[in-house]
Amino acid sequence: MTQKTLLNDTHRALGAKMVDFGGWDMPIHYGSQLDEHHLVRSDAGMFDVSHMTVVDLRGEQVKPFLRTLLANSVDKLKATGKALYSCMLNARGGVIDDLIVYYMADDFFRMVVNASTREKDLAWIREQAAPFNVEVIEREDLAIIAVQGPTARERVIGLLGESDRAALEKLGRFAALETATADGTALFVARTGYTGEDGFEILLPQTAVVAFWNALSAAGVRPAGLGARDTLRLEAGMNLYGQDMDEEITPYEAGLAWTVALDEGRDFIGRDVLEAQKAAGNARQLIGLVMDEKGVLRHGQVVLTASGEGEILSGTFSPTLGKGIAFARVPGGELGDVHVDIRGKQIPVRVVKFPFVREGQAQPGVLIDG
């Protein structure tokens, strides 16, 4: 049975093209994926991401539990509301999911995990939490709207009561604040996102989500669908679970070494595998590709390198750059000249550092004139 967010009727009234996304009926676009992409890069767009799962973790041992559960270290979180991006690994070092965790108090952390992995994530978290006597609470009462783009923050702040606006204006990146709208609706506002633009991800009661969406619309924020969200996140160099990583891929093989904290005295799940892999050197690596010729790089295409064959993971036409871009997983070592097999033709591509785009601008080396 396909699940629906409470904004489903709103999306349909706006003329959205709906698709099945991980068992959820979600908007892919509202008329033009391209226009929605440029909207977020130039102004502000809003995404219904209420299919994501919010989990509250409570208990005296919640911090030791998360030190074991996550490859990144929650010891980095000192201030209330501060956020951490991490992978949650299995015993083989493979990625069960990537997620964001927020420090609320020494006995209370909040976590947001992917929609498509909800059931396995909750089962794994509960299994690992049991020895620590940590309470795992799925917050089905909460919806999530992401507002992203250069003008996103000011439009959201304008909906708050005047006494709350200054604190949200000062909120740093990768941090969250509990606040309220002018009419008293409770909001959990995080300065995070999945587009490479500034903005907020806002958790609020399901009962208030339609009214808040409409208030954002009245403030000049237009809707954007999952199609634009995908091209935006790839330009921003952000992984998609299930396509760029999964339970057979370690963070080192997914370009996520920066999310692994091998801090002394912390024995997290999968650590021994990661330490061995780091010592031996990666057999596989994730790279960014740009194609200067016309065409689109797509998932599954074969990548040819001096070290052997790899494949395209996430690939798309970048609306911001006007070129094909992709993540590819290829063998470790020197790659030499790299080509992609497109319908039997070997098309040259360039290996570049990602993100491809940051806050609307091509990053150095991505364009030939760089």
Image (cartoon, rainbow, N blue to C red):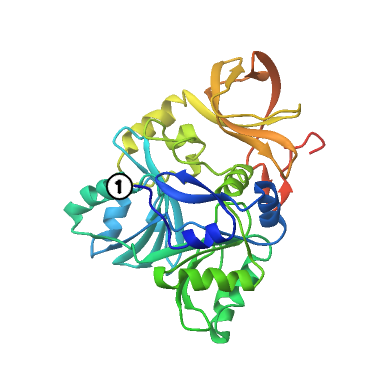
Q: Nearer the viewer, residue 46 or 202?
A: 46
CA neighbours of label 1 inside 10 A, class few (<14), some (14 to 19), many (20+): few
Instruction: Tell me: residue 89, above or below residue 85.
Output: above
173 left or right, relative to 259: right
Q: Please, which residue is most extreme toward the bottom here?
A: 163
Which of the 4 quarters of the picture holds residue 162? bottom right
In this orientation, does residue 66 appear? yes
Image point 69% across, 54% down: which residue? 41
Element carrying mark 1: helix
Q: Quadrant of the C terminus?
A: top right
At label 1, the amino acid type is Glu
How many marks the image carries: the answer is: 1
241 left or right, relative to 167: left
Which of the 4 quarters of the picture holds residue 13? bottom right
Residue with the mark numbered 1: 119
Q: Please, which residue is most extreme toward the right here?
A: 369
Percent from the top left, x then y, of residue 287? 58, 31
Percent from the top left, x then y, of residue 38? 71, 52
Percent from the top left, x then y, of residue 164? 53, 82
Percent from the top left, x then y, of residue 66? 31, 54
55 left or right, relative to 288: left
Instruction: Tell me: residue 66, above or below residue 109.
Output: above
Instruction: Tell me: residue 294, above or below residue 61.
Output: above
Image point 70% across, 61% down: which residue? 43
